[in-house]
Image (tube, rainbow, N blue to C red):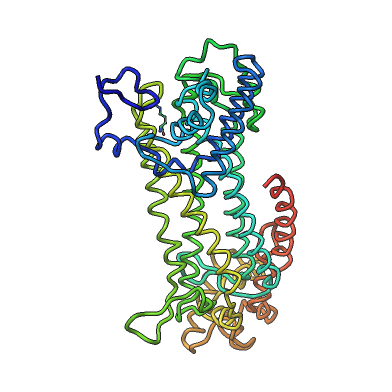
């Protein structure tokens, strides 16, 4: 009878079909989990010894063997072979090759089902922290820029139309708030998923007298998971991560869109540095914002990965099913996309030029202080708001008739429009007065923006801890 030389080959009478090996293998991508696989195997071996399932000599051989394998993979000397199916089998096979019979004991009281669950979960939790550290770096860059722009005035928009004057730092802090929430979201999902599935075995636990609390502690988890069957099929931790990454890419995409707009010649609020811009192959004069455009465009694939895993998991019966092997590539892809996106956004921002004068000039278009004039008439002259709104409408029409912005009208011109407008009203037409009047908590005044920056700096100190 022809033998099957796989680790699981005992009951098979022929070797695997070539195409099956190609289709079935996860090794080309899950080799990325080798560090987690080896770390979890070491913790498992220590537990087996502690529980007197293997002896100290065997444990030492296993640990040394695993360390040798880790350095072979680190240095690129390890020969991966897709017939080994996945990283778990590749490592175990090599271990047996290196240390013989003791290596055959490592798989006692565990299965690949809990092994892949713990390796992947550990990987996702580690990357959760890494992405948080990149978000912290980005926030620090945005805060650095903000500190010198709390009185850099520019038009705040609604419907992409000029609305009210704000300062540039205030807008950057709006994005900082999004990235802060992204960190909170990751922190929450870290806590939610910080439980160890190792020791659940195939689906129903194990008859060996193991200590799952020991392995959980050893690997840095809060405690073991509660139900073996759930543990081997649960991929919520991957979904949570993919969702968090999707929200991050959405925030990046919104910010990138602003950068595209602001760097266009219509706005010219910022200039992207040459090292983060590209040229056109036909139009020699062009300088294109490819980087912000790509950052904006990356959202499609990151959302797609979330939908892909949700769809894979839908309808799976308990417990482990091979469909679950499809969980890794989508996470790797979203992770790598967000990794480089956050780093390039951060680097690019450090090199942008902020065109203060253009921003201020843009405030002299669109009658940004119209609301201020209406509010003044309500508060100082006691005119009902609806009537004040009407009077200001007439002032705007007058300004337009002489091709001026509201903020450029003289005192005489202003008072001439309606006898109810007092001379003191003129001061509220000033764009800086307008911005600084919005001094409510969270408002755009320079003082309020500075206070927001101080809160963010204090927040950063707390959320950097442990990264
Ligand atoms: N390569 C598999 C995966 O990624 C590992 C678990 C395989 N378990 C099994 N019973 N076939 O999901």
Position of 18 with respect to 397 (left or right) is left
In terms of depth relative to the viewer, which is nearer, 425 or 220?
A: 220
> Could you tell me which residue is drawn at 42 percent across and 64 percent down?
294
> Could you tell me which residue is drawn at 31 percent across and 25 percent down?
4
How far across and down, in percent of the image, does residue 152 sit? 65, 75
Quadrant of picture, ligand 1: top left
When the figure is inspected, residue 255 is found, relative to residue 191, above or below; the finding is below
> Could you tell me which residue is drawn at 42 percent across and 57 percent down?
298
When the figure is inspected, residue 284 is found, relative to residue 65, above or below; the finding is below
Give the number of marks: 0
Q: Is residue 140 visible?
A: yes
When the figure is inspected, residue 165 is found, relative to residue 40, above or below; the finding is below
How far across and down, in percent of the image, does residue 378 sit? 63, 66
Please tell me in which quadrant of the rendered image residue 69 appears.
top right
In terms of depth relative to the viewer, which is nearer, 197 or 10?
A: 10
In terms of depth relative to the viewer, which is nearer, 249 or 456?
A: 249
> Could you tell me which residue is drawn at 51 percent across and 67 percent down?
157
Q: Is residue 388 visible?
A: no
In the picture, which quadrant includes the N terminus? top left
How far across and down, in percent of the image, does residue 281 sit? 34, 80
In terms of depth relative to the viewer, which is nearer, 263 or 417?
A: 263
How far across and down, in percent of the image, does residue 278 sit? 43, 76
Position of 135 with respect to 235 (left or right) is right
């Amino acid at each position: 009878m022809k033998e099957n030389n796989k680790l699981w080959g005992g009951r098979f009478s022929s070797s695997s079909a070539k195409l099956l090996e190609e289709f079935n293998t996860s090794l080309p991508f899950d080799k990325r989990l080798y560090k987690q696989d080896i770390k979890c195997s070491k913790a498992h071996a220590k537990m087996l010894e502690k529980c007197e399932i293997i002896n100290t000599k065997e444990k030492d051989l296993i640990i040394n063997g695993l360390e040798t394998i880790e350095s072979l993979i680190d240095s690129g000397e390890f020969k991966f072979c897709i017939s080994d199916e996945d990283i778990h089998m590749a490592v175990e096979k090599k271990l047996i090759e290196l240390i013989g019979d003791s290596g055959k004991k490592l798989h006692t009281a565990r299965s690949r089902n809990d092994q892949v669950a713990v390796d992947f979960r550990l990987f996702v939790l580690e990357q959760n922290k890494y992405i948080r550290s990149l978000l912290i770096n980005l926030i620090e860059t945005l805060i650095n820029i903000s500190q010198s722009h709390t009185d850099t005035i520019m038009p705040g928009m609604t419907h992409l139309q000029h609305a009210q004057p704000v300062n540039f730092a205030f807008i950057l802090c709006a994005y900082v708030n999004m990235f802060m929430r992204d960190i909170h979201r990751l922190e929450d999902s870290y806590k939610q998923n910080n439980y160890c599935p190792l020791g659940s075995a195939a689906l129903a636990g194990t008859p060996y007298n193991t200590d799952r609390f020991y392995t959980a502690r050893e690997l840095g988890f809060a405690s073991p998971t509660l139900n073996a069957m759930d543990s081997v099929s649960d991929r919520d931790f991957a979904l949570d991560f993919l969702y968090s990454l999707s929200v991050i890419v959405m925030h990046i995409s919104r910010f990138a869109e602003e950068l595209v707009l602001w760097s266009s010649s219509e706005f010219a609020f910022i200039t992207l540095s040459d090292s983060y811009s590209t040229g056109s192959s036909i139009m020699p004069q062009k300088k294109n914002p490819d980087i912000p455009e790509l950052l904006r465009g990356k959202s499609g694939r990151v959302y797609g990965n979330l939908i892909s895993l949700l769809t894979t998991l839908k309808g799976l019966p308990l417990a482990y099913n091979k469909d679950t092997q499809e969980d890794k590539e989508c996470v790797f892809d979203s992770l790598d996309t967000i990794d480089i996106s956050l780093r390039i956004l951060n680097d690019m921002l450090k090199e942008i030029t902020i065109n203060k004068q253009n921003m201020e000039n843009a405030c002299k278009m669109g009658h940004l202080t119209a609301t201020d004039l209406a509010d003044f008439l309500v508060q100082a002259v006691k005119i009902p708001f609806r009537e004040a709104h009407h009077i200001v409408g007439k002032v705007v029409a007058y300004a337009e008739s002489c091709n001026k912005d509201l903020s450029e009208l003289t005192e005489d011109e202003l008072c001439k429009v309606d006898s109810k407008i007092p001379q003191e009203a003129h001061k509220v037409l000033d764009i800086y007065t307008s911005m600084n009047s919005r001094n409510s908590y969270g408002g755009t005044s320079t003082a309020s923006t500075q206070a927001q920056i101080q809160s963010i700096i204090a927040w950063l100190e707390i959320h950097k801890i442990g990264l």
